[in-house]
Every structure is written in structure tokens, then in C-alpha cells.
Image: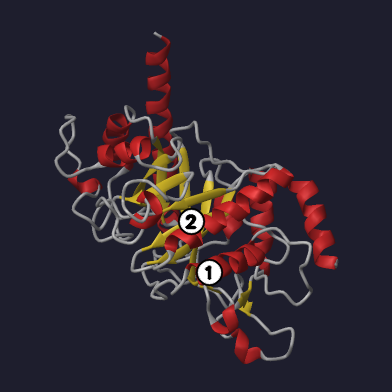
Amino acid sequence: MLLLILSFLSALLYGAHAKLNANSTTNIALYWGQNSYGESDGPLAQQRLSFYCADPNVDIMNLSFLLRVVGNEGHPELNFAAQGSENCTFGSDPNGDDLAFTNTFSCSQVAEDIKSCQQDHGTTILLSVGGATYSEGGFCTAEEAQAAADNLWSTFGPLLPNATESQYRPFGTAALDGFDMDFESRFTQSVPFAQRLRDRMDAQTSVDGKPRYLTAAPQCPYPDASDDAMLNGPNGDGNGAVPFDAVFVQYYNNYCGDQSFAKCTTEQPSFNFDTWDTWASNTSANPRVKVLLGIPAGITAAGSGYKSARDLRFIFDYLKSFASFGGVAMFDASQANANGGFLPQVASGLNAVAAGQRKRDEL
């Protein structure tokens, strides 16, 4: 009962806060959690979540990653860099069986920061499910996938009326604004899993009016090897596809990455944003879906695809003509922080292109 009361008070306090804008071309999403820059301490090490939310250029924070949807004793398993220190501590089973809680965490600092990000900065907070090291493989049946989605919702969504004091919630009374599907390997029964999350979020939004989001992070080759069923339906024709609010297409570590972009021409033999724009308008279950350009935030963030903020302006100028273009998604926060000035320069480039487009539209 105490948890439920706290959740209700939080809802009154935070209100509708989500910052992702489906009508904007200047959204910036930032992945946080993996400390890919690699510093263990000091100003270039991964900082706490609230540090990045305080940047007015950041609209969306993707907590990365949830590595297992169904881990030990059925509990989802998180992996953040520096877990076990300030970010998270190993969880304890309220019933006394701590072995059952191996690889589960209590993340009080992250929980505090989720609330401050939402309340003080209006930042959209998503949980990215999967990542490059995900190997769980999905589920055998649709019923198992739906049950796992229900468990994920009760773990990271708003507290449900039937919540108990012993329910595993690594972020306590803090509630996420949605989920990001970032499967980079085989994931069976992905459609019923993602659709159930969509349904649960939409049902809650109809009650409290708060916007909630479902996103995906496919690789740039189309169709995506792991996310295709969710994006295009089981038969690839759009029927039965899951409605996503945005996709953060990874334009790095692939032949079609940002490094393949040809400046000063509309002919792009490898850089295939036009293909994803066609998907958005012709196949997506949500015709208003936004496609964000996934970029490395530093030269060591990916094997290929990094572009300086100056070079990215050429790409933004090309992308402005696509109705689905919605901004950029950066991997990751530690790289952006270490790459001095990169994030504000990218934001400036997006804003300059958007302002130029508005001026042309007014003529």
C-alpha cells in the first residue's frame, strides 16, 4: 500500500512530462549506461543519469541495457556500467533467498535521477531492451512473450493497484516513459512481446493521459535481421506490424552507415535513409513514426560511421526533405561527454537546418 501511495503522489507531482516530439526534426536521444568511452573515474567517466538530463539539448535518455527479459527467478536483468557502486547495488530477495536475485539490482540513484529528469527537465526516459550482447533468444510461444511483457510492465511501469511490498522494482516508485526494442540477434515471438507492451502502455495512457513511447533500434540494412517481424509484420507486408513511435536506425558498423554518405548529391547508392522513409510512409503500423539517425557520439563508439558535427550538417541538409526524419540518436552518453562540444554542435546543426526549412516553407 505504501508503494502505491508513493506512486500516486509521484504521478500528481510529475504530470505529463515526456519531451519526445513527433512533429520535430530536432529530437536528440542519448543512450546511457554502458560507459563505452571506458574511463573508470574522473570527468570523462560515465556520470550519473541526471548529469546528462541537465543538458537542454537532450530530449530522450535510453537506459541501456536490459540484457535478459526473463532472468533468474523470472526477474529482468539490467546491466549498467559502474553497477554495484553509486548506480546500483545487488538486490536482495524480500523473502530471504538472495541467490534468486543474482544479477538483479536495486538502483536507488538511478530511480532518483529518473524522477528528476522527468520533473525538472521533461526528459523522456526509455529502457533499451537487448543490445549487442543480448543472447536470450526470445520465447517459444506467444503466451510466454505476453507474460514476459506483463512482467516488464509491472517492474518498470507505474505501480499497479495489486502491487505488493515485495515486488521486484529496481527503480522503486519511478516509472519509465516507455521501452526501446534493440535486438541485434534472434528474438522469437517479438511481435506478441512488443505488441503487449504497446497495449499496456496505451491502456495506462487512456487512464492518466501521460504519453508513453515504444521505439526500436534496427541496423540500417533493410529489412533488419532481428526486428523485421515487429517493423513489417510476420509476413513482411505490414500486416500485424507493431506500431512504433520512433525508430533509432543505427547508421554505423554497416556498409550503409554515415561513412557511406555522398556529399552534395541526392544520389546515395549505399546511404539508405530513403528506404527507411519509404517504410515509414508505406509499411509502418504508425504512419506518423519518426526515423532518427543513429550516430556514434565519438570516434571510438563504433567501428565505423563516426562523423564530426560539421560533416553531419551535410547529412542533415539531405535528410530535411524526408517527412519521417526526426533527429538523431547517439551512442553513447560517455562518448558525447568526452567528445567536447559534439552534442551542442549537433543540436545546433539540427536547429539550423530546421530553421532554414521553416523559412523556405513560409515563402
Residue 353 at what x, y percent from top left? 37, 27
Image quarter of residue 354: top left
Image quarter of residue 298: bottom left
Q: Which residue is mark 1?
A: 143
Q: Residue at x 45, y 54 (%)?
A: 337
Residue 215 at what x, y percent from top left? 47, 51
Which of the two discs, 1 and 2, labels the residue nearer the N terminus? 1
Under mark 2, the amino acid is Asp
The quarter in which the C terminus is drawn is top left
Viewed as shown, does residue 49 lie left or right of 108? left
Q: Is residue 177 visible?
A: no
Which one is closest to the eye, mark 1 or mark 2? 1
Q: Which residue is mark 2?
A: 180
Viewed as shown, does residue 262 lie left or right of 134? left
Mark 1: give few (<14), some (14-19) or many (20+) Cα within 10 Å. few
Residue 282 at what x, y percent from top left? 34, 36
Q: Nearer the viewer, residue 236 or 59?
A: 236
Number of numbered labels in the structure image: 2
Image quarter of residue 132: bottom left
